[in-house]
Image (tube, grey):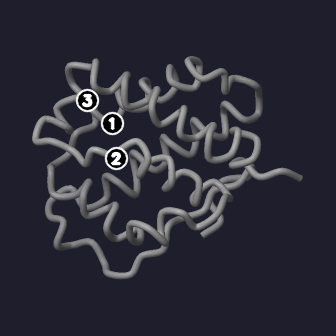
């Protein structure tokens, strides 16, 4: 059985998805606030590499950029932002449409992954980035949900 990564078009498909999502969030008046203090020029490539690894592809993110701890720390210490999270998920769902990743069950699996990551892992340490544990592995997601 092919992985979610393969079904999404591999690294190229996930890069297109990351670009479509980033374009949508930058146009959203609420979600774009998360980027108001700037972001890495290669943000979409980093995001795509993270999704590649999380969805069953090569460990591209871990090799080049860091572990889950570094990702979660970037998203931590900014308070609770449920409306922003939901709008980011909505942008992701639209980005799935923009990139043609709408066949089932792929669309639902990608939605579930992104919603889970947004509302749990990335939102868990809302008070302080210092609360994020060291050496966290990137969680992996399959057709049946989280596996690590």
Q: Who is closer to the viewer here, 27 or 131? A: 27
Q: Name the one closer to the observer, 51 or 19.
A: 19
Task: Give the left or right position of residue 65, taking residue 16 as reference.
Answer: left
On screen, residue 18 versus residue 134, left or right, reads right
Residue position marked by numbered label 2 in the rendering: 42
The disc placed on residue 85 is 1
Towards the viewer: 131 or 52: 52
Image x and y of residue 130, in percent: 16, 73
Mark 2 or 1, nearer chain start: 2
Q: Earlier in the sequence, mark 2 or mark 3?
A: 3
Q: Please state if 71 lies on the left or on the right of 18 as rendered.
A: left
Q: Are marks 3 and 1 in contact (CB under 8 Å)?
A: no
The residue indicated by pointer 3 is 31
Residue at (64%, 64%) from the top-left corner?
A: 58
Q: Residue 44's image quarter?
A: top left
Secondary structure beneath dot 2 equals: loop
Residue at 54% x, 63% y is: 60
């Amino acid at each position: 059985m092919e992985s979610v990564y393969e079904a999404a078009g591999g690294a190229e498909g996930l890069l297109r998805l990351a670009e479509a999502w980033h374009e949508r969030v930058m146009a959203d008046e609420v979600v774009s606030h998360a980027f108001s203090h700037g972001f890495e020029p290669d943000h979409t490539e980093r995001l795509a590499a993270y999704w590649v690894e999380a969805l069953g592809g090569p460990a591209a993110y871990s090799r080049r950029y860091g572990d889950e701890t570094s990702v979660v720390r970037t998203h931590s210490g900014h308070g609770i932002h449920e409306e922003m999270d939901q709008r980011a998920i909505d942008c992701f769902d639209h980005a799935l449409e923009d990139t043609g990743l709408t066949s089932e069950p792929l669309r639902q699996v990608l939605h579930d992954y992104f919603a889970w990551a947004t509302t749990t892992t990335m939102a868990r340490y809302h008070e302080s980035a210092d609360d994020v544990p060291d050496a966290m592995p990137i969680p992996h997601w399959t057709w049946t949900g989280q596996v690590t």
